[in-house]
């Protein structure tokens, strides 16, 4: 069955960096465009970054553009999110999934907390 396992979150001070990983299994990872999403308390889940099947094309939410970088390793069935210059507004649970209206079952996510 499809499994998405996010990791790499934690507590970081404003201006700090984190690298999130999402290990995928149960489907042919390389044929799916993927994305990172986040959900802050009391807010809707939003897409923050997307990446094409080959990794050659990426897209970012305006709020993270220039600070976050999405990448993927199709040999390892893993998608990454490098987050730099983190702000308190980036505090949320981060998830990966298809970059599509259709979604796999969501994983448990990884908590990112940006606070001094």
Image (cartoon, rainbow, N blue to C red):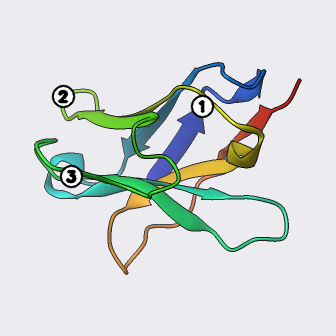
Label 3: element kind = loop
Q: Nearer the viewer, mark 1 or mark 2?
A: 1
**Residue at the image point whose x is 52% and y is 66% from the top:** 105
Instruction: Tell me how far mark 2 sits from mark 3, CA to CA.
Output: 11 Å
Q: Residue 41: x and y, percent?
A: 83, 62
In front of the other: 78 or 42: 42
Dot 1, how many residues are within 10 Å of its Cα: few (below 14), some (14-19), or many (20+)?
A: some
Q: Residue 33: x and y, percent?
A: 23, 58
In front of the other: 82 or 6: 82
Label 1: element kind = strand
Q: Is residue 56 left or right of residue 107?
A: left
Q: Is residue 18 left or right of residue 12?
A: left
The answer to whether the residues at label 3 and label 1 have Cβ atoms under 8 Å apart is: no
* Residue 39 disc label: none
For marks 1 and 2 on the same chain, the one whose residue lies earlier in the sequence: 1
Dot 2, how many residues are within 10 Å of its Cα: few (below 14), some (14-19), or many (20+)?
A: few
Q: Is residue 30 left or right of residue 88?
A: left
Q: Is residue 30 left or right of residue 96?
A: left
**Residue at the image point whose x is 54% and y is 41% from the top:** 5
Q: Which residue is mark 2?
A: 75
In front of the other: 1 or 105: 105
Q: Which residue is mark 3?
A: 28
In front of the other: 41 or 66: 66
The answer to whether the residues at label 2 and label 3 have Cβ atoms under 8 Å apart is: no
- Above/below status of 59 relative to 79: below
* Residue 7 disc label: 1
Q: Residue 111: x and y, percent?
A: 74, 40
Which quadrant is the N terminus positioned in? Answer: bottom left
């Amino acid at each position: 069955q499809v499994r998405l396992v996010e990791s790499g979150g934690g507590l970081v001070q404003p201006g700090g960096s984190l690298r999130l990983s999402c290990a995928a299994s149960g489907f042919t990872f390389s044929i799916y465009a993927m994305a990172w999403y986040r959900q802050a308390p009391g807010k809707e889940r939003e897409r923050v970054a997307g990446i094409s099947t080959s990794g050659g094309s990426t897209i970012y939410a305006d709020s993270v553009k220039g600070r976050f970088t999405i990448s993927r390793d199709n040999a390892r069935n893993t998608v990454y999110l490098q987050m730099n210059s983190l702000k308190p507004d980036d505090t949320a649970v981060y998830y990966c999934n298809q970059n599509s209206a259709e979604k796999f079952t969501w994983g448990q996510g990884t908590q990112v907390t940006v606070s001094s």
